[in-house]
Image (cartoon, grey):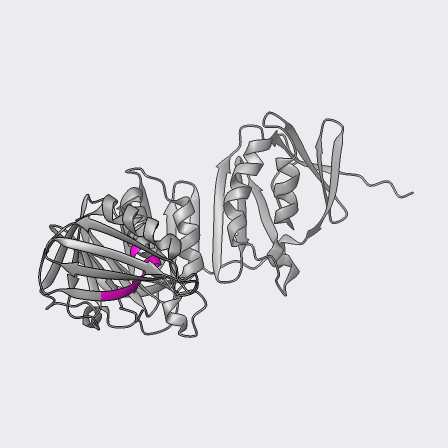
Amino acid sequence: MLLRLYMLLLETNRDTLLTPLQTVMGVVEKRHTLPILSNVLIEKVGNRLSMLTTDLEIQIKIDTEISTPATEGDFAITVAAKKMVDICRAFNANAVLRLETADNQLQIKSGKSRFNVQTLPAKDFPTVDTSIEANNHIKIEQKKLKNLIAMVQYAMAQQDIRYYLNGMLLVLEDNAITVVATDGHRLCLAADTLSESVNKQEVIIPRKTILELTKLLADTDEYVTLTLFKNQIKFELGNTQLISKIIDGKFPDYNRVIPTTHKNILTANSALLQQSLQRASILSNEKFRGVRLVLSQNELKIVCNNNEQEDAQEEIEVEYQGEPLDIGFNVSYLLDALNHISSEEILCHFGDANSSMLMTIPENENYKYVIMPMRI
């Protein structure tokens, strides 16, 4: 039997490895033609330990300062990301893990437990080129960016053949930041101010990037730095760096979609409307999720029915001055917005039964949500 001589790489507590591994795991694809893309690049330089994953479109890297550099020096190694996470999770929080390597294998030891997993050369691991010149460089509070994204991200398309809809439009102009998402049936826009003026630029950030970024952003006043390049964008927050390619395509002209002449205006309590829609939707058609809004002076009827001849009706008092109206929508689209709005009241602007509805927040020009009607 051949005796392997293992070289010590690192000895540290479990969470020093597990916490960053769990953060970078979201980028790793379950099935990929390149086996190395299922791996995480673990690298140590001095007292800095870094974890990096990529799917060739998105790259995420986390740096951690380690206080126990009892190693044979710097190293770089790649190992299956999911296996590494599962092994680390299997130990309790105060466990000390010892990483050793020999003959293209990584050995993880703790107490009398030992795991040997295969490695691939770190030099073969693909990383994003970050040496290109930047077009814009801005800082924004994490909670501000997180709130902007939360208000629109549900309107992004999923696997639409119109690939430019499978993401979120980010618009920078003067001292304003605007985010827009649409799936062709609805469009949502949210905006806020920046502390400094920037060059005008528009980029479409892929859906997967937005979902990963949302996990990283915290509800704090700490800044996230955005660096925009010609064909990629970089987010830096704390010890974490997320780099993504941007979608090369022409986003729809969102200003043309937003109605400006609707005169029938409904003012409703957001929570009351949300609860009424949720109750009525229990008996909506499971496939089409249709709901009828029947409007008359200061009254709103919410009606849902399905193919089994079942129906539900809710009536709530509202402020409504306009023509009587009977209009249908996808109830899920209405609830998506109400679930992400913190305002106590909501305004709904209507044209006729064939026109889109514009949802806004009172005394707030920075939020607009447009929903196309449906026949019920």
Quarter of the C terminus within the rendering = bottom left
**Residue 120 belongs to magenta span:** no
Residue 74: image location, x then y, percent: 60, 41
Q: Quadrant of residue 230?
A: bottom left
Q: Is residue 128 above or below residue 76?
A: below
Q: Is residue 124 left or right of residue 376?
A: right
Quarter of the N terminus within the rendering = top right
Count of labels in the image: 0
- Can you name the residue that lies furthest to the front here? 309
Q: Is residue 228 visible?
A: no
Q: Is residue 297 above or below residue 182?
A: above
Residue 252: image location, x then y, percent: 28, 72
Which residue sits at x=24%, y=45%?
272
Which residue sits at x=61%, y=62%?
32
Which residue sits at x=29%, y=57%?
334
Q: Is residue 14 above or below residue 1?
A: above
Which residue sits at x=43%, y=70%?
160
Residue 58: image location, x then y, percent: 47, 58
Q: Is residue 142 visible?
A: yes
Q: Is residue 324 left or right of residue 162?
A: left
Q: Quadrant of residue 321?
A: bottom left
Nearest the eye: 365 or 337: 337
Magenta residues, as a range? 327-334
**Residue 332 belongs to magenta span:** yes
Nearest the eye: 110 or 305: 305
